[in-house]
Amino acid sequence: MKIKLALFLFVFALMGCASTQTATRQTPTVMIHTSNLDVIKSKIVDLLASRNFVLVKDTPYMMEFQRQAQGIKENLIISLSIGNSYSTNYFTYNFMFARLPQGIKVTAIPGIKAIMPGGQVNTATLLNNNSVTQECEQLLQLIKSEVEDTTSTIPSSSATSHYQSY
């Protein structure tokens, strides 16, 4: 009887340890106080291009970037999570834009993508990874500060006319 009770408690404890916990972390989002979406998109392209990301899709409400995984460590991480040893692996960033009365809300979703030899595409977001989410939030804050600084210090036409004469 004691063995059955101990076995039951052991199995019950294992089941409790195996349960998944859902993350309550929100998607990285920032409100940029400007109505000029082109300035925001240009800053995002500039920052991500400097990190070797390539723009693969651009619509009025979304931009998608990807960078091929480099080296054994990066490829191994993606291959073990969603790919295989033959997949072509990428890190991705998706930015979504919403025009609101107070400005433009920018949401960023970091992720990974594996393209299998047969053409199957597997994707996953990295929102449950705290370090990646924090890096994404820092990137959004950098974009916000640079865009708001740029749009608040646009020179007047009289100031630019001096430089246009040269």
Image: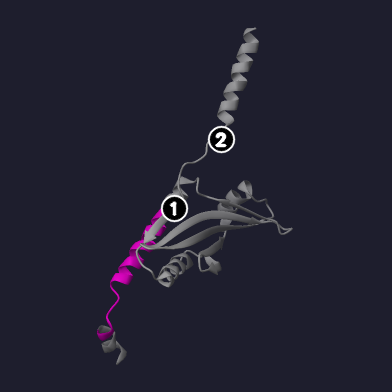
Tell me the residue at 47%/65% (across/down).
48
Measured as percent of width and height from the top left, residue 33 is found at 34, 64
Lower position in the chain sequence, tag 1 or tag 2: 2
Which quadrant of the view contains residue 102? bottom left
Tell me the residue at 39%/55% (across/down).
138
Tell me the residue at 47%/63% (across/down).
51
> Any magenta on residue 146?
yes
Q: Residue 51 bears which disc, if any?
A: none
Q: Nearer the viewer, residue 156 or 117?
A: 156
| Residue positioned most to the bottom | 165
As drawn, is 94 to the left or to the right of 80?
left
Q: Residue 28 bears which disc, if any?
A: 1
SS for dot 2: loop
Disc 2 target residue: 20
As drawn, is 103 to the left or to the right of 17?
left
Specify the quadrant that holds the C terminus: bottom left
SS for dot 1: loop
As drawn, is 160 to the left or to the right of 113?
left
Determine whether 68 is above or below 23 in the image: below
Amino acid tagged 2: Thr
> Any magenta on residue 37?
no
Q: Label 1: few (<14), some or many (≥20) within 10 Å?
A: many
Measured as percent of width and height from the top left, residue 132 is found at 47, 50
**Magenta segment, principal secondary structure?**
helix
Q: Which residues are magenta?
A: 136-158
Q: Nearer the viewer, residue 71 or 100?
A: 100
Amino acid tagged 1: Pro
Specify the quadrant that holds the N terminus: top right
Tell me the CA gap for discs 1 and 2: 22 Å
